[in-house]
Structure formats: structure tokens, C-alpha cells
Amino acid sequence: MQIELKALNKKDEKKAIQFAVKGMHFDWYLDNKIALNLYGRYFWYLETSRATQMIAAYADNRFVGVILAEINGEPKLNSSIWRKMYVKLAEGVQRFFFKDSVGVYDKANKKMYQKYIRTVQPSGEIIFLAADPDCGIKGVGSKLLAELENREKGKIIYLYTDNACTYQFYEHRGFERVGEERIELDMGNRKVPLTCLLYSKVLGER
């Protein structure tokens, strides 16, 4: 089946949120369906407010995946004030219910990034990449990543992920692991051990 890459249809944003919920294992932290959907929306709004590249994949007009990137010097694609307000509100709720867990994750990422930029000057970040886990079509993520590489060839780019996600996908496509931090998230009724990871690559190179 042929995969077509184009701009994301606004009606497919709800599906993108579900891709994030499933693909990034948000159910590790939340077991309430409403809370999962709210957090997925928060995550999507947060990343789309930063994005300068947004590429969607369709198969027979069915939305099957999307990649977002923030590249230095490029204009933002979405600057909705309402979305920014939603993000701020959601961050306050997270701090109230999950105590320091959000801060622990962010601190680990910042620590890795500070070490990384001592020797590297990146041009941008891949901030979201997800494919429909139920579509049964192989190669969606690879095609999205290849398109971004074609658009931004030669630029040094990085991304954050963790061992709850399919980080091996990036290793198989030439990304180098340049940071690793082990943390434990306090989710109230349970502790969740996690390894935060930082990857880097010169786009267009293997």
C-alpha cells in the first residue's frame, strides 16, 4: 500500500493524540481513560506549539502517522493562544497530582542536554514521531523520518526518548545514543523506574 506524505488534516489531530497515548505508553503512568486522553491532548498541544516541521502520512486517505520537529530559525506552524493556555493549566494539574515526577523527568533531560551541547551545536529537535500501531502498515515511521531528513539534510538534530518507547527504531536508523539517565517517577500509588535517553544524528547520514 502506498504511503502519501502531506500536511496534517486538522480532523486527524484526535487520532494523533491516540497514537501518542499508545505508542509512548502513557498508561504506565495513568490508568484512567479520561486522564489518559487529557494528558495526550496536553502532550500534542505542547509539541505542536513548538513545531516548525509537521509531516503527516496517509494510506488510502487514512491517517497513519506524523512527525514533528523544531528547527532553529524556522517559523512556528501553530501559535494558538488557547493551546498555550491549555498546556499551562495541564502542567499545573500534573504538578499537583504527580508531585515532583514531572520535574524529575525534565531535570534528567536537561542534564543530558547540557552535557551534549558541550561538544555539539544542534540545529533542532525531533519532538514527536508516531505511527498508528493498529494500521498494519510497515515503514510509516521510516518514511516520515526519511522525508524530514530530505528537507533538513546535513543538520544536526537530537531527540529525547526513554526505555518505555521503541528507542531501537532510532538506533537502527543511524542515531547515536549520547545521553542516558536513570530516574524513578513517583506516581502516588506506585513507583515507575525509567531510563531517559538522548539521541543525535546528522540528518542524511547513516
Image (cartoon, helix red, strand yellow):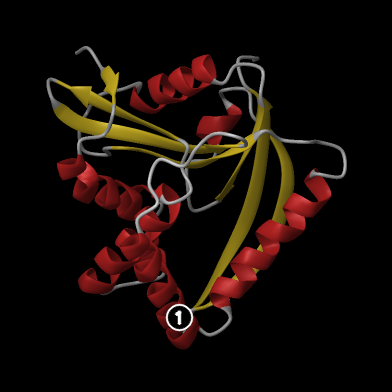
Q: Residue furthest right?
A: 118
In the rendered image, the vertical position of residue 172 relative to residue 112, given as above or below: above
Q: Residue 74: where, in percent of width, then height?
A: 54, 34
Q: Residue 18: where, in percent of width, then height?
A: 25, 51
Q: Is residue 164 left or right of residue 130?
A: right
Q: Is residue 7 visible?
A: yes
Q: Is residue 78 left or right of residue 137?
A: right
Q: Is residue 189 visible?
A: no
Query: Helix, strand, or loop for circle 1?
Result: helix
Q: Residue at x 34, y 69 (%)?
A: 86
Amino acid type indicated by mark 1? Gly
Q: Quadrant of the N terminus?
A: top left
Q: Residue 130: where, in percent of width, then height?
A: 37, 39
In the rendered image, the vertical position of residue 96 relative to residue 162, given as above or below: below
Between 79 and 6, the one lying in front of the other is 79
Q: Is residue 12 left or right of residue 41?
A: left
Residue 203 position by quadrant: top right
In the rendered image, the vertical position of residue 14 relative to residue 185, given as above or below: above
Query: Badge 1 is on which residue?
Result: 92
Q: Residue 27: where, in percent of width, then height?
A: 34, 64
Residue 140 position by quadrant: top left
Between 89 and 59, the one lying in front of the other is 89
